[in-house]
Amino acid sequence: MEKQTIKRLATVKKIPELYPGVFTESSIRWLIFNEKQNGFSCCVRRLGKKVLIDLDKFESFIDGKQQGGTKNV
């Protein structure tokens, strides 16, 4: 039996709760608005009107920015 991996997804409003003092809802919305230019599109999942953030890819994105590059996931 294969082990399924469960994607960790969060809403835009949930991100500041998961990373207190680091990200605001506004900063996440800015990243989403500019996702094509800043490479954040790899983290965004859309289901109809609902916008979700893939937390594993989000953390990889942040790690890539911290190292000074744009890390495509």
Image (cartoon, rainbow, N blue to C red):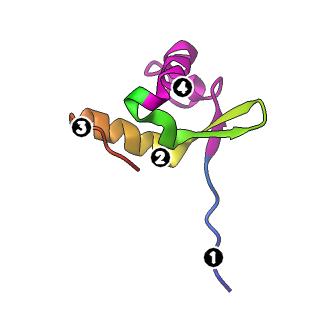
Residue at 47 percent across and 22 percent down: it is 34
Q: Position of residue 48 (x, y in %)?
A: 78, 36
Residue denoted by label 2: 57
Name the front one of labels 3 and 1.
3
The residue carrying pointer 4 sits among few (fewer than 14), some (14 to 19) or many (20 or more) residues within 10 Å by Cα, namely many
Does the residue at mark 2 contact the one at mark 4 (Cβ under 8 Å)? Answer: no
Residue furthest top in the image: 26
Residue at image point 39% right, 45% down: 60
Which numbered disc flags the more N-terminal residue, 4 or 1? 1
Q: Which mark is residue 70?
A: none
- Which numbered disc, 1 or 2, marks the residue closer to the eye? 2
| Left or right position of 6 against 39 | right
- Give the alpha-carbon distance from disc 3 to disc 1, as whole Å: 33 Å
Query: What is the three-letter code of the residue carrying label 3?
Result: Gly
5 vs 32, nearest the viewer:
32
Counting from the top left corner in percent of width and height, residue 63 is at 32, 40
Q: Earlier in the sequence, mark 3 or mark 1?
A: 1
Residue hosting label 3 = 69
